Image: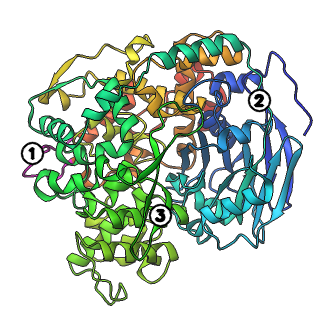
Amino acid sequence: MADPGSTDSNRGHWGRVLRAELSSKTTSLQDISSDTYRNYLGGLGLGARYLWEHMDPGGDPMGPENILGLVPGLLTDTGSLFTGRFLAVGKSPQTGGWGDSNCGGRFSPSLKRCQVDGLFVSGASESPVYLLVSEDGASVEGASDLWGLDAIETEKLLKKRHGKRAQVACIGKAGELGSYLAGICNDGGRIAARSGLGAVMGSKKLKAVVALGRSRVPVAHKDKMKELTRSFKNRIPTSPLLQKALGNHALHITGRFTRISPVFPRQPAELWRQLLGRFGTPALTAMSAESGDSPIKNWAGVGFVDFPFKRARKIGGESVTRYESSKYGCFSCPIRCGGIVSMKGGEHPIHEMHKPEYETLSAFGSLLLNDDLVSIFRVNDLLNRAGMDTISVGGVVAFAIECFENGIISEGDTDGIRLAWSSPDAIVALVEKIIAREGIGDTLADGVKLAAERIGGDSQRFAVHCGGVEAPMHDPKFDPGQALAYLCDATPGRHTTASYQYLELQNLERQFSRAHKLPMISTYRDRYRHQDKMDNLAVDTFYKMLVDGAGVCLFGTQIGGDIPISDWLNAATGWNLSPDTWLVAGERILNLRHCFNLREGIHPLRDFRLHPRLYGDPPQGRGPAKGITLDLDSMAQSFFETLHWDPHTGRPDPAWLRSLGMADVADALA
C-alpha cells in the first residue's frame, strides 16, 4: 500500500479503509473524507456510515451481499488508554437488521497499523480463504487447511506461519457451520460474540484475517496526548490493601444490603476499579446472584432462594482466581481485569484459557442453577474454541432444560441426555451437541427464538429473548435502565448500551451540559420512577456510541478518574471540539444504526419485544423484584420522545436529523 503520509486532514486516522471482495478475490483501498471522522469517528460510527452507504436494504444476512466490517476506534493506537477495541459490524442473522459486536485483545491496533481505519468484506468465496493485510498490501490466501480447526488452533497456526507480530481475527467451528450464535475471535479466546457475525464470516468462507501492521497512526499533539494519559493514569491508582479486603464476605454483605435496603447510595467507581483489578468481572458473580441482578433458573427463579450465596460463591471471584496463573490485559489497558487460568487433572484438563467472565459464569451458573466450576471452565473452553457467544448458548441451554422439564422434549430428542437444572454433565454434553449442530444441537444452534419455532408446542413460553437475541445476564427489574437498552438499541438485548448503574459510575454530569446531576442516595421507589430520567439515559446512550466510535473499553469509563475521551480525541485529531460536540457524534451514530433498521422494515417497539419474564409479567412472588412489573410501553414512549423518534412509526423527526447534519438519512427515509 502507498503511504498516505501525515496531513492536517488525517491525524488520528489514515483517511482510508480496505475493501475485500471475496467472490472475485480482489482488494482495494477507498478514501474516507475527514468529515466522516469528525461526524462519526472510527469504530462503530465509521462502520455504521460505511454500511449505510454501501448496502441495499432487503439483503440476506447470510448472503454475499452482506458486508462484514472490522473497524478499530479513532483513538486506537494513539497513545491513549483503554483504547484497544474494534467493532465487528454487518447485518445480523439473528434480527435481520443492524448487527455489531465489540472486542478487545490486540487485533485492533495491529489492523490500524496496516495504514487503514477499517476492513470491509463483501461477496463470498467458493472455498475457504483468509485475508493477509499489511502496510505493503492485502491478499486473499487459501485456507482449506485451516477449515475445521478451532479458533485457538487457527490463531496459533497463522502466527507460526506469519511471525510473532501477526494478530489474527478468526472463526471456529460454530462460524463455519453457520450458527447464528457464532462470534469472531482473537487473542486466544477474546470474542466479538454478539449479533451472530461469526456466522456471516463463515457464510463468506472467510476463516481469518491476519494483520501484520507496524505503522503508527499520525497524532496531532503527541506531547499533549502523553500528558493527558499520564495524568489520567495517576488518577486511577490500585490499592492492594483494599483489594485484599474485597473477598467473598464483603461481597456477600454488599449483595445482601442491595437486596434488602430501602435506599441505594450512588455506586463508587473507585470500588469497582479495585474489584476489577483483583478479580475481574467474576467479582460480580456471587454478589449479583444475591442482589437480584443475575437471572436465575431461566429468569423464573430468585437468587437467595434458588441459588443462595453458599452456592453462588463456588463460582465467584475468589473461586475463579484460585486457578489464575497470570493477569491479562487488552492493548493499552492499565487495569488488566482478565486472567489466564489452568485446571489440571480430570478427563479434560485445561492447560491455558482466558478465565470465564461474569456473563459466562452467570449464563452457565445461576441461570442453570449450576455451581460446578469445573463444568463452567469446560464450557468456557469449548465455546472459546468454537467461537461462540456464551450468553446466548447459556440461554439456549436454559430454554432446553425447561422444555425437557415440562415434557415438550424428551430423551428421545436429546439422544439420551437427561436435561435438568444443576446437572453439569448434561450441560456440557448439550453444549457439545450445539457446537457440532448434532441432533438436538442443530435445533438449538441458532438461538431460542428459532428453536421454539422449530420445536413448537408450548415452548415459546420458555424462549427468553429480545427480538431474537438471548437476554444478557443482568435483570432489568434490578436496573430498569437496562430494559430500555434491551428493547430500543439497534442490537436488542445489549446490556452495555445504557443503565442507571452506568450513569452513577461515569459521572457524565461533569463532562456534558446535557447530563443532569444525580442524587447521592435514591430510594426503592426512585428506582422505578422513569419520568425524570430519560434525558440522562439518552446522554448515556450517546456516550456509549461515542465510546465505541473511539474504540474505548466501557470499563475504562466506569473506574473513576474522569476518563478524558474528548481531550484525547482533540489531541489525536487537532480539531479542538467541545465535549458536547463530540457527544453529538455519538447521537449521530445512535440514529444511523436505528435508521438502518428502519430501512429494513424493523421497528424496535414492535419487532424487539421482550419476553414477559424480563419485565415482570407476571411479577415474581418473592425476592428483590417481588411485585414488580415494569411499565415498558410508557418507558419506551418517553425514551423515544426524548430521542425525537416517533413512537408509532419509529422514525426520527426529519428536522432533528437535519439539525444533526444527517439530511441524506432523512431524505432516504422519506
Q: Residue at x 36, y 27 (%)?
A: 537
Eye-nearest disc, 3 or 1: 3
The residue closer to the viewer here, 458 or 274, is 274
**Residue identified by numbered label 2:** 216
Q: Amino acid at mark 1?
A: Gly
Label 3 sits on a secondary structure element that is: helix
- Residue 197 placement, left or right of 314: right
Q: Residue at x 32, y 51 (%)?
A: 610
Q: Residue at x 21, y 41 (%)?
A: 630
Q: Is residue 620 magenta?
A: yes
Distance CA(mark 3)–CA(mark 1): 39 Å
Contact, CB < 8 Å: mark 3 with mark 1?
no
- Using the image, determine if residue 303 lies above or below residue 220: below
**Residue identified by numbered label 3:** 381
Q: Decide: few, some or many residues near mark 2? Use Cα within 10 Å; few <14, some 14-19, many ≥20.
A: some
The residue closer to the viewer here, 510 or 90, is 510
Distance CA(mark 2)–CA(mark 1): 56 Å
Mostly what secondary structure, the magenta segment? loop
Q: Looking at the rendering, which quadrant does residue 527 occupy?
A: top left
The residue closer to the viewer here, 391 or 222, is 222
Q: Looking at the rendering, which quadrant does residue 639 occupy?
A: top left
Q: Whole-percent x and y of residue 669?
A: 59, 37
Q: Looking at the image, can residue 670 be seen? A: no
- Residue range (magenta): 616-630
Eye-nearest disc, 2 or 1: 2
**Residue identified by numbered label 1:** 627
- Residue 65 placement, left or right of 321: right
Q: Number of numbered discs present?
A: 3
